Image (tube, rainbow, N blue to C red):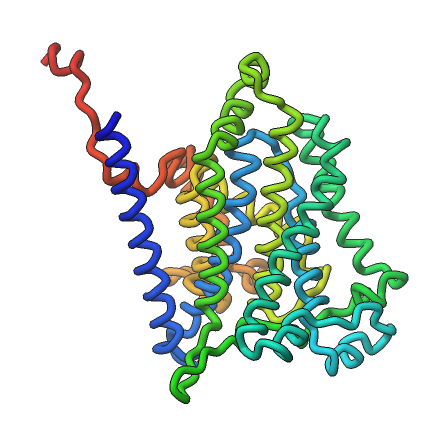
């Protein structure tokens, strides 16, 4: 038992140092690579990949660890994106953004705090807006979870998918224009491309570091939840609800906690996505976004946080960067038929996904995490006796 605890402590420190090294690398890449460089796409992949990694991990917390099949992730991300955008638009830009409506909310959290605390107030205001985005998504999850979590399997998926589509339609309703700007996009809010750190007169870019930091901290919190008593209760519910209830686990309570927690981090992911894209528009959060996130979870491995991160980065890198040249209509010397010419990249990408699913039926990682790859396999005494 003592050795086990010391080994866990050692693994925790190794993981912590690896995360610090990774963040340091991202910070350096932010300074070395310019958006106009050939490797500029690497920064975009890291920005979007970190956002989708957080979204995939938050979905995995619900679908993979608790066994609740929900398809409402795009709706919660939409809530987070709009909440963040609305409360970070500067006062002087609000009339230009809400050009067809009289803005009902005229309050920018970073701007108000910066008047009293300078640059630190701006950073604190962005942090508060991110947390507020998560809380709004979590509150909505709690409200719809009261009736919806009584459903199971496909019925729960259909109900949450319907919620996401209803939210998207409501946010484009002209009657809510003074708050959501109707079907028009929100812009000019605090965005990643404008984040700078000035040291001794030198301005350092944080456009990639900040989204990666947000995703890293959020995923770390999810890992702590999974490894806590709540996480063990989630897994028990996933494996056998009847047995879990017999052991004294309150099913309704823990399902609600999982649903609300997953939605909170989905809201933070949506806010971070708005921060990266520099716009927030309901039309971007269609059901296809939920399917893409679900695909990332399946590719990485249902029940593996490491797999969700790897699957998200590979998905974004392949779709946004590596296969971008296929839009010309050629792949490995093969000329695409005219019918596929405009979407040849998607055809090749779909074939690659099919191959991965066929040969990695449990995903790239299955249920394993990164530390499991470095552990020595225990020898089976029965097999040794037979040999």
Location of residue 263 in the rendering, given as x and y in whole percent from the top left corner:
63, 45
Whether residue 28 is visible: yes
Vertical relation: 361 (above or below) 182: above
Q: State the image quarter where residue 97 is shown.
A: bottom right
Location of residue 301 in the rendering, given as x and y in whole percent from the top left corner:
44, 38
Direction bottom: furthest residue: 201
Location of residue 232 in the rendering, given as x and y in whole percent from the top left corner:
48, 28
Is residue 44 found left or right of 187 in the rendered image?
left
The total of numbered circles placed on residues is 0
Is residue 275 found left or right of 178 in the rendered image?
left
Residue drawn at (17%, 12%) of the image: 382
Is residue 57 found left or right of 134 in the rendered image?
left
Q: State the image quarter where residue 282 is shown.
A: bottom right
Whether residue 319 is visible: no
Work out which quarter of the rendered image holds the C terminus and state it.
top left
Q: State the image quarter where residue 99 is shown.
A: bottom right
Q: Nearer the viewer, residue 78 or 80?
A: 80
Direction right: furthest residue: 175
Residue drawn at (70%, 30%) of the image: 149
Residue drawn at (56%, 60%) of the image: 343
Residue drawn at (43%, 35%) of the image: 227
Location of residue 20 in the rendering, given as x and y in whole percent from the top left corner:
33, 59
Direction front: furthest residue: 116
Work out which quarter of the rendered image holds the N terminus and state it.
top left
């Amino acid at each position: 038992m003592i050795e086990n605890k010391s080994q866990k402590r050692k693994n925790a420190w190794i993981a912590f140092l690896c995360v610090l090294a990774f963040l340091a690398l991202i910070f350096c890449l932010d300074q070395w690579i310019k958006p106009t460089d050939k490797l500029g796409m690497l920064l975009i992949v890291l920005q979007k990949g970190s956002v989708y990694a957080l979204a995939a991990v938050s979905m995995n917390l619900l679908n993979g660890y608790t066994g609740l099949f929900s398809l409402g992730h795009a709706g919660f991300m939409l809530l987070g994106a709009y909440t963040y955008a609305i409360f970070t638009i500067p006062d002087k830009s609000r009339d230009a953004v809400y050009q067809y409506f009289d803005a009902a909310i005229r309050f920018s959290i970073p701007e108000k705090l910066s008047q009293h605390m300078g640059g630190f107030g701006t950073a604190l205001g962005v942090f508060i807006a991110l947390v507020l985005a998560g809380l709004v998504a979590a509150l909505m999850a709690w409200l719809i979870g009261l009736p919806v979590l009584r459903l199971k399997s496909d019925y729960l998926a259909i109900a949450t998918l319907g919620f996401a589509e209803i939210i998207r339609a409501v946010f484009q309703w002209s009657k809510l224009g003074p708050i959501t700007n109707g079907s028009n996009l929100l812009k000019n809010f605090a965005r990643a491309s404008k984040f700078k750190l000035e040291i001794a007169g030198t301005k350092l870019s944080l456009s990639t570091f900040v989204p990666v930091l947000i995703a890293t901290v959020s995923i770390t919190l999810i890992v702590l939840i999974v490894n806590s008593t709540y996480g063990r209760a989630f897994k028990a519910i996933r494996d056998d609800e009847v047995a879990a209830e017999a052991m004294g686990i309150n099913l309704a309570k823990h399902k609600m906690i999982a649903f609300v927690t997953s939605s909170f981090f989905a809201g933070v992911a949506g806010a971070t996505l708005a921060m990266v894209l520099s716009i927030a528009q309901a039309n971007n959060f269609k059901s296809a976004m939920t399917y893409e996130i679900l695909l990332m979870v399946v590719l990485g491995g249902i029940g593996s946080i490491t797999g969700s991160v790897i699957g998200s980065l590979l998905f974004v890198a392949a779709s946004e960067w590596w296969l971008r040249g296929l839009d010309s209509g050629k792949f490995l010397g093969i000329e695409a038929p005219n019918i596929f010419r405009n979407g040849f990249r998607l055809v090749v990408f779909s074939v690659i996904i099919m191959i991965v699913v066929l040969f990695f039926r449990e995903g790239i990682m299955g249920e394993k995490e990164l530390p499991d790859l470095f552990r020595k396999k225990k020898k089976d005494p029965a097999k040794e006796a037979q040999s």
